[in-house]
Amino acid sequence: MCCSEKDPPHNQPDQYNIANMNIVQWFKSAPMDNVRKQIRGDHALSECQRCYKEEQHGYESKRIKENFKSVIFTEQAFDRSYAQSPMRSKFENDTVDGAPIDWHVDLGNQCNLACKMCLPWYSSKITQHFIKWQLPRERANDSWTQNPAAWSEQQNNNWTLNPVAWQNFLDSIDAVTNLNRLHFMGGEPLLSKRFLELLDYLIKKQRTDISISFVTNGTIYDQDIIDKLKQFRKCDLEVSIESIDKNNDYIRQGSNTEQVLENIKQLVLQQTENFNIVLRSVPQLLSINNYNQFLLWAWQQQLPVQGVPVLNPDYLQISVLPLSLRQSLIPKYQDTKNSITEPNMQSLSTGRNPATIAQALRRECDAIINMLNAPEPNDVDELRIKLSTWLQRWDREYGFNAHDYYPEYREFLDAIQYQV
Amino acid sequence: MLYSTKFKIGLVPYGAPCINYGLDGVAVNNGLTIHEPCELSFDLDLDSGAHEFYIDFYSKTNATPEQAVEIAWVEFEGMRLDRFKWSSTYTPVYPEPWASQQTEVLPKVHNSMTYLGWNGRWCLHFETPIFTWIHQLEHLGWIYT
């Protein structure tokens, strides 16, 4: 239903599966009908909890961004804008016609990094560690992509390698002639041979009217791919990075921050009106010590940042740090906010609009300050034990010592009995 | 189809200017003298399409050179955004003999001018459905249709 959903809207993965049906059939299926009815109802959807939580922290959630596409101003005037939305009659019509024109596609979990906040279903590297540690390896297939064959361990949870599923996907693209946007995530899409095949397929089929976007970890720079991407109507290349300092390597294990920054600089040089670079981050306990430097760097580079705070794993949430330690960081974010010059005008900002970078970065500072001031969770002691276990497990594997990266956390790390 | 539209306009007077105002050529109030900052508030059902709210400032004379009207802000649907007041034109009535004495041609219409130092008509241009217009004015991205 949505890339931010808490749970899928069905528990019949064998039936609702890209190997068994195309995307239009799924869009018109009973579970999706039910979701649409719930959205029209008076109660908040449990599936949308993540967005609600992000909004509580002051973030512009996926829900808010998507609503703007239907001219629904969620934060400013929900009821009145919904009443005038060009999509209202479609929303209120029980009969679904047409097809979704804006797709989010997860290409499987093939990845060359093992980020500390990531999970097996997004990283084959993490999967390997989970197997080695004999941890329960939650599967990635509680969704329409589930197929025991497609998601087999040997294939790195990669449904795209199931020929039937992949052909259904291509047929779905062919069938939706007004497809507007394809957004890809992985794993690392640039490691997916299917992603590269798909670009060629779309170019060959003269479907370059589609807007392409994808999230990459920035470790791979390939000019041939960039040249292909530039042929599309629009391309947003979204680079995940948490910090411009060495703790980025601590968080994004297997990464080389200097190389990633260099790749970003090369990509920035390639920017055009239709080929844009966006920074993606997941603010968390492990980046909040110097995330302000990252925001300043983004401001200097004039790059938009799309931050989504870590809510899961819950022990990496910013609020797990002691309140006093968090509050000691607030002046840095106030200074950062003040140094990002606000244009002398009142305007709205959403998503990755390059014209409103200052507003978006200042909003990010406000959201971070909000999280630095938030009360500690009720189960904070339990979360800190989990955090300590998690960091020690990874750091022994990668030869890291958190003390080297977080001198300002020394007392806290000692208190949670972190030792490597 | 009619679209419910709420908007407010904040005015700051200099001297005690007199204005007429109205919408789409229809007068709403004639002969209003403004002594202190005030707001004009509207809650209307409007047809789909382009609309024009006007303010005619007419009381400035050689005897009242201090008079002027400033459009301080414009608010639609509770949102007070700068681009609203800039979505406007100002057609002054230049005073004589001053106008004839100018060596350069005076513009007939000024875009996005919010300080009315001469008599003349200020027009706020907007469209309904209002949220779609705001979406486009603020460059909020593409829209599902």
Image (cartoon, coloured by chain):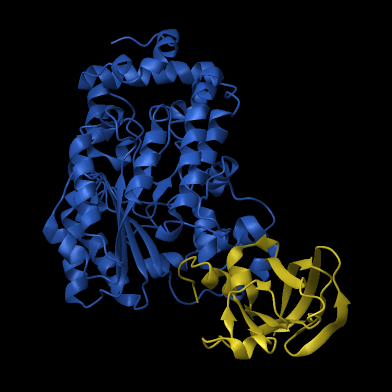
Q: Nearer the viewer, residue B30 or A309?
A: B30
Q: Residue at x 26, y 68 (%)?
A: A170
In this rendering, position of residue A4 left or right of residue A418: right
Q: Colour of chain A?
A: blue
Q: Residue at x 74, y 90 (%)?
A: B25
Q: Nearer the viewer, residue B124 or A413?
A: B124
Q: Position of residue A388 (x, y in %)?
A: 39, 16
Q: Position of residue A385 (x, y in %)?
A: 44, 15
State which quadrant residue B54 falls in: bottom right
Chain identifier for the yellow-coloured part of the image: B
Q: Position of residue A174 (x, y in %)?
A: 29, 75
Q: Residue at x 71, y 81 (%)?
A: B53
In this rendering, position of residue A295 left or right of residue A55: left
Total tally of numbered discs in the picture: 0
Q: Residue at x 17, y 49 (%)?
A: A191
A400 up-or-down from A309: above or below: above
Q: Nearer the viewer, residue A170 or A34?
A: A170
A341 up-or-down from B115: above or below: above
Question: Is residue A162 visible from the viewing direction of this image?
Answer: no
In this rendering, position of residue B128 left or right of residue B68: left
Q: Position of residue A227 (x, y in %)?
A: 16, 64
